[in-house]
Structures are given as C-alpha cells and as structure tokens.
Image (spheres, grey):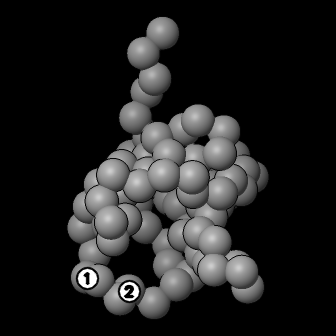
Amino acid sequence: MKVMIRKDSKGLLSAYVPKKDLEEPIVSMAQPGMWGGLVTLGNGWQLDLPAMPEGTTLPVTVEARRIAADE
C-alpha cells in the first residue's frame, strides 16, 4: 500500500495512508533509521517499510506492507 511518511513541526514522524484516509503517529521503529524495518503506528498497525538511504528527504511516499496482527 502507498504510505506517505512525514515529519511535523515538532519533529514527530507520522504515516498517512491515502486509501484509508488514515494518519497516525509512528510510535516505535525496529530500526534506528526507520527504513528497511517495521514501524508501529499509534493505532497498532505495523508497517514494513522499504530500505531507503539514510537522510532521505521527508515527506516521501513509499510502498509499504501492512503486517497482519495475530488474532
């Protein structure tokens, strides 16, 4: 799914999913640089982000994969 990653004026990262009209803060990251790993959104979703170069300019739209939660 397409996801836009951006940083607000306070420096906090958020993810926007246009198809769901959903914007949530990124509350945790598996990798220190975020790219190429899992991030967890405020609503509990986990997204697997693609590998990107460190210092990638934000905002940026990427193709991410949602990891289904075990139920």
Residue ID at (46%, 41%): 46
Viewer-nearest residue: 5 or 39: 39
Q: Which of the numbered marks, if any, corresponds to residue 45? A: none
Report the amino acid beneath label 2. Thr
Give the image quarter of residue 56: bottom left
Circle 1 residue: 53
- Which secondary structure, mark 2? loop
Q: Measuring 42% from the left and 15% from the top, which residue is drawn there?
A: 70
**Is residue 32 positioned above or below 9 on the image?**
above
- The kind of residue on which mark 1 rests is Pro
| CA gap, disc 2 and disc 1 | 6 Å
Residue in front for this viewpoint, 55 or 62: 55
CB atoms of marks 2 and 1 within 8 Å: yes
Element at label 1: loop
Measured as percent of width and height from the top left, residue 12 is found at 64, 72
Q: Is residue 10 left or right of residue 7?
A: right
Residue in the picture at 68% in, 53% down: 24
Give the vertical position of 12 relative to 17 (above or below): below
Task: Mark yes or no: residue 65 visible.
Answer: yes
Q: Disc 2 marks which residue?
A: 56
Q: Is residue 20 left or right of residue 59?
A: right
Q: Position of residue 4 (x, y in %)?
A: 56, 68
> Could you say where residue 28 lies in the image, as x and y percent from the top left?
48, 52
User: Would you call the spot at circle 2 few (<14 residues within 10 Å), some (14-19), or many (20 or more)?
Assistant: few
Q: Is residue 50 visible?
A: no
Which residue is drawn at the image coordinates 28% and 75% (left, top)?
Answer: 52
Q: How many marks?
A: 2
